[in-house]
Amino acid sequence: MTNKHTIIVLISLIVIVGSVGYSILNMASLPVLQFSWPGNQFNYLSVMTDKTVNVCNDSPLPASFSKYSFTIIYGGKELGTYITGNGAFAPHTSGQVYGKFDSDADSVSALFFSFFDTANGGTEVTRINMEKLHIRTKLDSTILWVMPYSITNDYSGSEFLNMINTKLSCK
């Protein structure tokens, strides 16, 4: 007959290996996640009113995260951050996560965002230098549900527009 301690140790090892394996698979699938604005119609002013972001997991592995956010920065100063809740996506699936925009000064952000949209539309706004616009995205998750793990990317304003308005590859 097998010793009770041996059975307990084997079960514990299976649980530990399974948990570590799941975390490693999640870390591998997170960089593959794609994000887009509903209808591929992103403009900076819509950040203040729209509440969802489309997510696509085009990897063969499941992916989950605790938060996706992007911070809009102009001239080194943060104008605000759009923050979503958590999401979990099976392989080759897509869905939506809900979020909201947070800023210390909504009226200032709205003014800048309308200038950005006008400049992106081809009309020159003399006081706005679009080269000073940067977006920082951050995807937060955890390893073993305890240790924080983040993926951060920096984009120029036009790079971010191209990325967030790209059609997702999930069917």
Image (cartoon, rainbow, N blue to C red):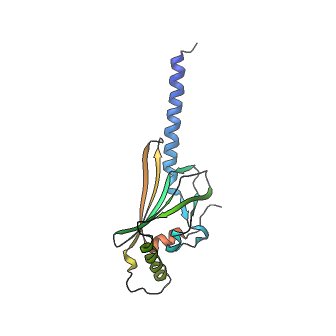
Image quarter where the N terminus lies is: top right
Residue 52 picture quarter:
bottom right
Q: Position of residue 29 (x, y in %)?
A: 52, 52
Question: 80 or 62, which is in the foreground?
Answer: 80
Point out the residue furthest to the right here: 171
Give me the residue at 53% from left, 36% from top. Answer: 18
Q: Nearer the viewer, residue 95 or 14?
A: 95
Q: Residue at x 53, y 32 (%)?
A: 15
- Vertical order, 65 against 8 (above or below): below
Total number of numbered discs in the rendering: 0
Q: Is residue 91 left or right of residue 67?
A: right
Q: Quadrant of residue 166?
A: bottom right
- The C terminus: image quadrant: bottom right
> Residue 30, percent across and down?
50, 53
The location of residue 162, given as percent across then percent down, is 51, 72
Q: Is residue 14 above or below residue 104?
A: above
Residue 88: where, in percent of width, then height? 57, 51
Q: Residue furthest left?
A: 76
Residue name at image x 42 percent, y 47 percent: 148
